[in-house]
Amino acid sequence: MRIFAYKPGHDGHVALLEDGKLVFSIEAEKDSGARYAPIAPELLLHGLSLSPDVPGVIAVSGWMNSFRPMADPVGAGYFGVGPEAVHLETGLFQGREVRRFSSSHERSHLLGSYAMAPFEQGTPCYALVWEGVIGAFYHIGADLAITRVGTPITGPGHKYGFLYGLADPTYPADARKSRREDAGKLMALSAYGRDSAETPEERRLIERLIEHDAARAALRKADYRDTPFFDIGLDDPSFHDLARRFQLALFERFHAFAKD
C-alpha cells in the first residue's frame, strides 16, 4: 500500500509510505525554508512527483483553517479522540479511485507517540499531550481506543510564550496572540533561574496564568499591567527566577494530576 500524507498549518511537510516503510519525509522549513513554514504548492507538487505511481491513500493531518469560533476544520480537524476524529472516504485523485484518510491533530499526537514507544504495540497505557493548546491526559487501550482522562491545564505552550512576551518590552501590549518562538525561549531562560525564596508577586502571577482557561479566552498582555514583571526585560534575573518557578509549577500540576 502506498500512502501520500501531508500536514497543513505551521511546520508543514509531506511524506510517502510504501508497505509500512517510510520512503521520504520533506519538511517545508528545510533547505533554508522559513521557520514554521506551511506547505507551499511547490512542495506538494514536488512530493507527488517523487511517488512512482498514484498513491492508494491520501492522508491529511487534521487542522483548523484558523483558531477562532466556528472556523472550518481541515480534514478531521484539531480536536477529538473518538470515532468522530477519524475520517475515511473514497474519492478520485488524478482520475483514479483512492481512499482519503484524516485523523484529528489531537489524536495524531497520541498515536504518533504510541507508534514510536518502546513497549510492545497493543500494550494499554496512559499518555500526556502537552502542546500549545492542549494539556491533557489520556488512556490508550489495547485496541487503540482513546479516552481523555482529564485536562489539568489548558494552553500550556501558549502560556510559556505569553510569559516571555509579558517581560519583553518589544512585544506590544495590544498583541492578539503570542509568538511561536517565545515558548522555547522561556524554557531556555528558566535554566538561569535561582532556587531562591518565592515572592508573593511571583505566586500570584503563576497561579493566575495556570488557572486561566485558555480554551475560553486568549491571554492579553494589556491585562497584566499590574504585575511588576510587565516589560521588566528579558535579562532581568528576577524574570529568570519567575520562568523557573513557572515551569516547576506547571510540571507539578501535571504530576499531581497523574498521582491522583
Image: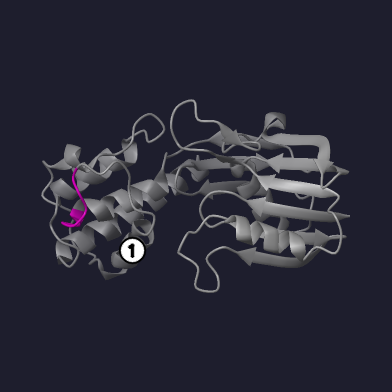
Q: Is 232 drawn above or below residue 58 in the view shown?
A: below
Task: From the image, give the main secondary structure of the stretch colored magenta.
Answer: loop
Image location of residue 113, percent across then percent down:
65, 55
Q: Is residue 18 left or right of residue 24?
A: right
Asked whether 67 or 229 is in front, the reply is 67
Image location of residue 223, percent across then percent down:
18, 37
Work out whether residue 125 can be spotted. Answer: no
Q: Which residues are magenta?
A: 167-173
Q: Residue at x 17, y 68 (%)?
A: 235
Q: Residues within 10 Å of mark 1 (few under 14, many from 20)?
A: some
Image location of residue 14, percent across then percent down:
67, 58
Q: Is residue 144 left or right of residue 177?
A: right
Quadrant of the rendered image containing residue 189? bottom left
Q: Residue at x 23, y 56 (%)?
A: 242
Image location of residue 124, percent across then percent down:
73, 46
The amino acid type found where label 1 is placed reads Lys
Asked whether 147 or 166 is in front, the reply is 166
Q: Is residue 2 left or right of residue 70?
A: right
Residue underneath mark 1: 185
Q: Is 15 drawn above or below residue 138 in the view shown?
A: below
Indicate whether residue 171 is drawn in magenta: yes
